[in-house]
Structures are given as structure tokens and as C-alpha cells.
């Protein structure tokens, strides 16, 4: 397979970028060629036969650049059905994962023309030291409860690599 796979992501605190890099490494390990880019940097989807897109959920919403990507590349995405991964919950509680699935479906429902191959939910990371603007302002507020919020990173790297291998096998079999 000569055409590269695009692994593109929206991120605020860097966590989704790290997952996108891990997915790319796993794809490369399966003999595929992938390119990792933030959604803001993607000018065209020409030349890609497969696309994997990732975004975090913040308070039930995807970052604005992720939505802009869908609008900017609507025509190509109607042909290239993307695989989508979402970083959501920061607690390993099944109901949190169910809520993230519903929130992701609601966000993607804004694009009825979009028919992803799969939407996969992974655990995310919460760390006040890695929150995006303007949430960094929260660090300065004298709110004791805010300072007690636990740092959490429940990204399951084994599951991320396993999902990436399944995606790679599906891409190879479709070629």
C-alpha cells in the first residue's frame, strides 16, 4: 500500500496528539505508512485513502478546530469514511464511557453526511498543569475544591495499540 494514512487530531492539552502519535507508530509497525498532523495543518485530503481522526471531549464538546475540519473537508470526507477516536472520560467508570459515546454521537450528529467506519472512545487525561486556555485561568482562582480535583490519566496504551492494529488490518484487507 503506497498511499499514506492520515492520522489527524484536535488537541488542547497535548493528550490527543500523544494518542495520535501512538496510533501512527502502531500503523507503521503493521507495515503501513502514516502521516500525523493537527487538523489545523491539513490543507487537503487528496492522496489519502484512509483517515483516522481524533479529538477530546471537553464538557461534552469537541474543540472548534475539529468542527472546522469537518466543514472544510466535507466533500472528501463523504468519500473517505474516517475512523474516529475520542478521548473522553478521566475515570474508569462504564457510565462515564457511555456518556462520552452519547456526547460524541451528538457532536458528530451535526454532520449527517458523515459516515465514519467506527467511533472509538478511549479514556483521557485531566491535569490542571495541561489544561488549555482559557481554563488556565482556573488555576489562579482561590477555589479550594478546584485544587483538589485529582489528576487522572486513564489512557490505555495497550488498548490504543490493539485498536490501531485492528484498524490496520481492516485498511489492508480493503486495499
Image (cartoon, helix red, strand yellow):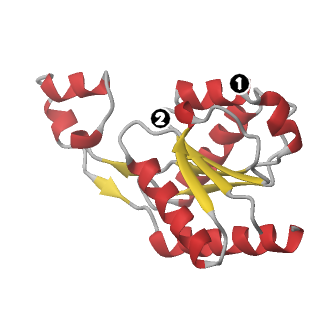
Instruction: Provide the residue designation for mark 1.
Output: 72
114 left or right of 57 in image: right
Q: CA distance from mark 1 to mark 2?
A: 22 Å
What kind of element bears circle 2?
loop
What kind of element bears circle 1?
helix
The answer to whether residue 34 is above or below residue 65 is below
Image quarter (top left, top right, bottom left or bottom right) of the N terminus: bottom right
Q: Earlier in the sequence, mark 1 or mark 2?
A: 2
27 left or right of 113 in image: left
Q: Nearer the viewer, residue 120 or 70?
A: 70
Can residue 55 be seen here? Answer: no
Residue 57 percent across, percent down from the top left? 52, 39
Q: Nearer the viewer, residue 60 or 39?
A: 39
Number of numbered labels in the structure image: 2
Instruction: Provide the residue designation for mark 2.
Output: 58
The answer to whether residue 66 is above or below residue 32 is above
Residue positioned 79% across, 54% down in the render? 49
Residue 164 percent across, percent down from the top left? 62, 69
Amino acid at each position: 500500500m503506497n498511499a499514506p494514512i492520515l492520522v489527524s487530531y484536535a488537541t488542547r492539552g497535548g493528550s490527543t496528539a500523544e494518542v495520535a502519535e501512538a496510533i501512527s507508530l502502531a500503523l507503521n509497525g503493521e507495515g503501513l505508512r502514516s502521516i500525523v498532523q493537527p487538523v489545523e495543518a491539513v490543507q487537503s485530503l487528496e492522496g489519502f485513502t484512509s483517515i483516522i481522526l481524533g479529538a477530546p471531549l471537553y464538557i461534552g464538546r469537541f474543540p472548534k478546530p475539529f468542527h472546522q475540519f469537518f466543514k472544510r473537508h466535507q466533500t472528501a470526507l463523504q468519500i473517505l469514511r474516517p475512523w474516529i477516536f475520542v478521548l473522553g472520560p478521566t475515570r474508569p467508570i462504564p457510565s462515564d464511557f457511555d456518556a462520552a459515546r452519547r456526547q460524541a454521537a451528538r457532536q458528530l450528529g451535526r454532520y449527517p453526511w458523515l459516515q465514519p467506519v467506527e467511533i472509538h472512545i478511549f479514556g483521557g487525561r485531566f491535569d490542571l498543569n495541561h489544561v488549555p486556555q482559557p481554563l488556565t485561568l482556573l488555576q489562579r482562582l482561590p477555589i479550594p475544591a478546584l485544587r483538589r480535583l485529582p489528576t487522572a490519566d486513564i489512557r490505555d496504551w495497550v488498548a490504543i495499540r490493539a485498536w490501531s492494529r485492528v484498524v490496520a488490518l481492516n485498511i489492508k484487507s480493503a486495499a
